[in-house]
Amino acid sequence: MKRVAPSVTRRSLLAGASGVGLSALAGCSERFWSRAENTGPDQVELTIKTVPADDDAIAATIMSQLRENFQAAGIDATHEPIAEAELYRDVLIDGDYDVFVLKHAGLDEYDALHGLLHSQFVTERGWQNPFQFSDIHADELLDEQRATDRAEREETLTELFNYLLETVPFTVVAYPDRLGGTRETLSVSRPPRRAIEIIDILSQEFEDGPFDRPLELGIYGEALTDRLNPLIVDRNRVQGLMELLYDPLARQSLTDESEPGEPATYSPWLAEEIEWDEESSLTATVTLRSDLHWHDGEPLDADDVDFTFRFLGDTSLGAVDGTIPAPRYRDRQTLIDDSDRIEVLDDRTVVLPFGSTARPAATRILSVPILPQHIWEPLSEVIAERQTRALVHDNEEPVGSGLFELVETSADELVLEPFEDHVLRSSTVPNRPSILEHFSQFEGIRYRIDPNVGAMLDALEDGEIDVTAGAVPPDSAAQLTDADDVSMVTTSTSSFYMVGYNIHHPELGNPNFRQIVSQLIDREYVVSEFFNGFASEPTRSTGLFGYQQYSQDDATLEGTTSTNPISVFPGSDGEIDPERVRQLFTEAGYQYDDDVLLE
């Protein structure tokens, strides 16, 4: 396997002195002192955390193959299955793991890597750098791609993805198709996950519609209604629900999910108009729609927009030294230039300053849900170290501004009724999103919550739900195709199964080690055997780090990322060749004692 040597630039020299050097030496120095203090080196040990098979059979199966291949490579690998909420807490809040296998919802734009990997977020919670990855060269590239437009940005992104091949803070295993089922009375092209996809179903004209009943959506799982806090990362598992309850300034268009390499397009939502000024530093002047209200009847105005972005950056609102940022949407909040304040011109007008950030990245701020200041400001009270009341609030009766308001929750259902005072329910409102032309064909939304996927599919067959919103695993596809009056629908997605590494682990701190263990999963075999073909494997470096689809105009990205070492599996049919793997570790400076890989 021939590897292309990177060009020697100021960046690569800097990276050699900082990025690879610091992370590699961190692991090597700990290994050195460990050997000095003990009689001899021990076997490399790794614990892999993921959800139980009942929660996600695919994640559990990927973990099983990874563990077996780790063990065959001489690593003492163990598995720790944890309920989904606890796993997210361990990984995203406490950083308590060695290796994890999780399904990520997907990255909406190349700039999403900034929050996932930038060292600015090393001490923060959520999907902000859960790997504890700290690398000066990577930071430089992540910052630069934010500040450049298309042509220069492609060059920076190419260097970034090639550098990630060397440092490997995480790696993608596969991109699953989204499978679902629908009653044939509805014309549904994809299983709904995002709010905009649910709104699309509500806006379609049907032969038997409009219906004098709610749209019935099927989901499954336990404790789905425990906490309805839009800021937390360990409990919100009803996909699309928070987006339905809390409106953003603009919504990403329906077709953008499958093309993350393209500049995202947005439909104005709470905003009636957005004017961009790029003459000196980038700003966006947002004019809100008139007569906006929260679900409790209070007016929604520009002060709520200003509050939302300040609150995401510091939920204590200045009550502590430093900040207590929100675990969700924090990276997007950093798009706002912290050297300048948001300017509220009047009740309907607010100016967002972006400083040196270029417009392709800055547009991501538009999709952040706006929060009511009168509800969340009192929750800024600090109740523990790095903890405010807002971050533990159950939010049992959410007050949002969406087209629907929550009226009932229980262990087996969530009921949303139309918010009749929403301005977008009027067909005469200026600059109304085109997707709402025939909105709404249903009297609200009802989520039916079943204990498992089988019960959800039975409800679909029995006509008790209209469409599945919960993910249908590939091994349940036959139940959909065999059912009467039911159609299976599929679509490719930007979501992915990933393997993440805790850089603080003595061995995982070494990028050479991470690069080898990232090869120890047969991605082609996973797609064909675990997903029954309902997925795609990453091959290019963009795909290995969250971007399977890319713009056809990204010639630079396409031309320089066609080969990589991580996607080359040292074995066949899912099983490694121990001798080939032993050689990889030996060449990286590791030693074996018989079949045991030593620290």
Image (tube, rainbow, N blue to C red):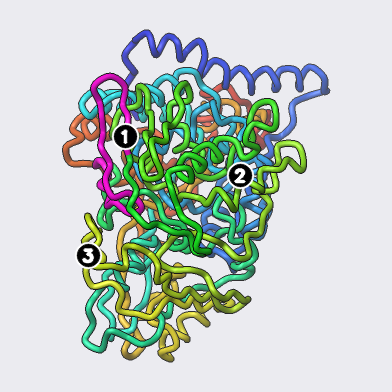
Amino acid type at circle 3 is: Thr
Q: Name the residue under label 3.
A: 428
Q: Name the residue under label 2.
A: 92
Decide: few, some or many residues near mark 1? Use Cα within 10 Å; few <14, some 14-19, many ≥20: many
Badge 2 element: helix
Q: Mark 1 points at which residue?
A: 284
Between residues 395 and 119, which one lies in front from this camera angle?
395
Highlighted range, magenta: 262-285
Query: Which quarter of the picture shows residue 555?
Result: top left
Say if the magenta span includes residue 267: yes
Question: For the point 26% across and 45% down, which residue is it?
Answer: 273
Query: Which quarter of the picture shows residue 440?
Result: bottom left
Badge 1 element: strand
How far across and how far down the image is residue 35, in percent?
Answer: 76, 21
Question: For the point 69% across and 26% down, which residue is it?
Answer: 321
Say if the magenta span includes residue 80: no
Q: Quadrant of the C terminus?
A: top right
How far across and how far down the image is residue 17, in percent?
Answer: 50, 10
Q: Are marks 3 and 2 in contact (CB under 8 Å)?
A: no
Query: 350 left or right of 592?
Result: left
Q: In this view, does 179 lie above or below 387?
A: below
Q: Can residue 232 be seen in the rendering of this structure?
A: no
